[in-house]
Every structure is written in structure tokens, then in C-alpha cells.
Image (cartoon, grey):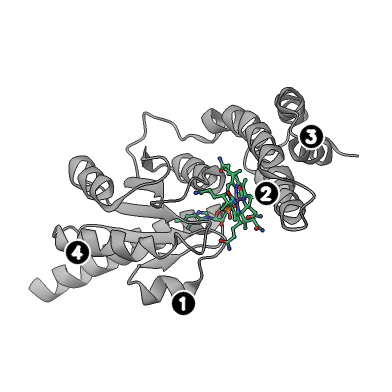
Amino acid sequence: MSTLDELKEVIINGNAPAAKRLTEAALNQGTRPGDFFAGAIIPAMDEVGRRMRECEFFIPEVLIAARAARASTEILKPLLAGDSSVRPAGTVVCGTIKGDLHDIGKNIVAMMLEGAGFRIVDLGVDVGPEKLVDAVRREGADFVALSALLTTTMVNMKGAIEALIAAGLRQQVKVMVGGAPVTESWAQSIGADGYGKDAPAAVELARRFIAEAARGMSAARRGAA
Ligand code: B12
């Protein structure tokens, strides 16, 4: 069994000290920080989800597994963060939407974006429209990244976008949405700028937004000339 396979098992079983030890061991063996997600953490949480669905796991087991996943991601976070002396590629305000307490996926998205050079303002979980609007205004955000894991909370993403419109901030930010129940067509229907199925997709989206903005600016300059 590889170290990443072992890590997956101990996360499922909620053994946080072992998750910490195995994460350090895999790093020492040369595993790249970004490879832990697809290699262990995400498959572990998928298996936890399957067991939850099949009523093999209940909330306490899921919480303990989530804590073990966090023990691993806390070690990876500083390693994924970009060089702070480099000017950030843009500011991302991120959070899990109102009513929703799931934050593992949102945290991975934030870590990957941070690793890709973006400045992250993480509002945490249960983020309502007022808190989002305040942060976008205060931080001069370029991007908003919203996560939802429940079909009952994904509807609140629409309210968040409407609040940005009402506050006159919608033109300032590109909004991306994600999370297990979220789809491309849902993103379009609520007026988001993009949907990402995973954390690397969030980075791709943010880079695409920057490239589109740069093309728009040079087209505007050509138009003005
Ligand atoms: C862990 C977990 C919990 C933990 C959360 C702990 C924590 N700190 O996050 C706890 C125990 C608290 C919990 C509670 C509940 N949960 Co829960 N939970 C899960 C579980 C097992 C794993 C979620 C997870 O972490 N996945 C791993 C991460 C890495 O994946 P992810 O979040 O999808 O994120 C990835 C992508 O989606 C994407 N992404 C995510 N966000 C974003 C954002 C952007 C901008 C982009 C681009 C991409 C992106 O990138 C991420 C990385 O690749 C899922 C099952 C599952 N497999 O999804 C159920 C699940 C989500 N929970 C569920 C339910 C029902 C609940 C409860 C209502 C249970 C209850 N009866 O109380 C409560 C709700 C509490 C609340 N108000 O939020 C259901 C939801 C059903 C539905 N369709 O709505 C699921 C699907 C389980 C099931 N099969 O029934 N849960």
C-alpha cells in the first residue's frame, strides 16, 4: 500500500494523528503538495460520503473524518501558498454559502488559488449576502468563489449574486461557483461567470478571467486609438 493509500484509509477512519504523520512521510518521500488532494483526501471524503449515504457512517464519524482531512490539509497549506514577495494575481473573496457548514472543498479551492498566486480572503462558512458584499467592497476583490454542498443551500448563491448587483459591485468581480450539487447550467441560470468542478478548475477559471480582462483592455485601447 502506498503512503497516499494509507493516508486515505486513516482519513476515512478519522485518525488525525496518523493523517498528520503520513502526510509528513509522503512529503519526505517527494510527493508534491498538490498531489495529496486527488491521491488521498478527495477519494477519502468521497468514500465517507458513500458510507454516510449507506448509513454505515453517521455525523460523528463524518466529523472525525473531516478533522483528519484537516490535519493533513493544514500541513499542505503553507507549502501550496505562493511566494508572498510576488504581487498577487488578484484578490479572491471566498466562502461557503449561507446555511451551509461544509468547508473542506472550499478550503482546498482556497489553498490551490493561494498557491497559484491569488490573495485569499476566506469568509468561512454560512456566508450571507451582507457579509459577502462588505468583504468585496472592503477588500477591493477581483473574484468571488462560492461553495455549496447542499441542494437546499445552493439556491442561496443566487441571492448572493443579487446582493452584489444591488450593491453596484457586480461589474467589479467575476463570480465562480462550485461544490458537489452545483453544475455548469446552474451557474449560468443564477448569473455566475463560471463553474468549476474541482480546485484546479477554480485556478483555471480565475486565470481565464484575467486573460479575458486583458484581451478586453487591449481591444478597448485599439478602439480608442
Ligand atoms: C464531510 C461532510 C459533512 C461534515 C462537514 C464538515 C466540514 N468541515 O466540511 C458535516 C458532518 C458537518 C456534515 C453535515 C451535514 N451534511 Co454533509 N457531507 C459531508 C461529505 C461526507 C463530504 C463533503 C466533502 O468534504 N467532500 C470533499 C470535498 C473535497 O469535496 P467538495 O466539497 O465537493 O469540493 C470539491 C468540488 O466540489 C469543488 N468545489 C467546492 N467548492 C467550490 C467552489 C468553487 C468556486 C469551485 C470552482 C469549486 C468548488 O472543488 C473541491 C475540491 O476538488 C458529503 C458527501 C460527499 N461526498 O460530498 C456529505 C453531504 C454533502 N452532506 C449531506 C448532508 C445531508 C448533511 C447534513 C444535512 C446532515 C444532517 N442530517 O445534519 C448536514 C448539513 C450541515 C450544514 N448545514 O451544512 C449530503 C447532502 C445531500 C444534498 N444533496 O443536499 C451529502 C452529499 C451526504 C449524502 N450523500 O447524503 N457533512
In the picture, measured across the screen, residue 33 lies left or right of residue 204, that is: right
Q: Which mark is residue 42?
A: 2
Residue 120: percent from the left, percent from the top?
37, 40
Mark 2 to mark 1 CA distance (whole Å)? 24 Å
- Amino acid at circle 2: Ile
Number of dots carrying numbers: 4
For mark 4, give the secondary structure.
Answer: helix
Is the residue marked by circle 1 packed among few (<14), some (14-19), or many (20+) residues within 10 Å?
few
According to the picture, the residue beneath numbered tag 1 turns out to be: 185
According to the picture, the residue beneath numbered tag 4 turns out to be: 165
- Amino acid at circle 4: Ile
- Whether ligand 1 has any atom under 8 Å from the Cβ at mark 2 is answered as yes
Tell which circle, 4 or 1, labels the residue nearer the N-terminal end: 4
Q: Is residue 171 visible?
A: no
Tell which circle, 2 or 3, labels the residue nearer the N-terminal end: 3
Foreground residue among 87 and 147: 147
Foreground residue among 89 and 47: 47
According to the picture, the residue beneath numbered tag 3 turns out to be: 10
- Amino acid at circle 3: Val
For mark 3, give the secondary structure.
Answer: helix
Q: Quadrant for the N terminus, please.
A: top right
Q: Which mark is residue 204?
A: none
Residue 192: percent from the left, percent from the top?
35, 67
- Whether ligand 1 has any atom under 8 Å from the Cβ at mark 4 is answered as no
Mark 4 to mark 1 CA distance (whole Å)? 20 Å
Foreground residue among 102 and 22: 102
Is the residue marked by circle 4 packed among few (<14), some (14-19), or many (20+) residues within 10 Å?
few
Residue found at x 51% / y 42%: 107
Mark 2 to mark 3 CA distance (whole Å)? 13 Å
Q: Are marks 4 and 1 in contact (CB under 8 Å)?
A: no
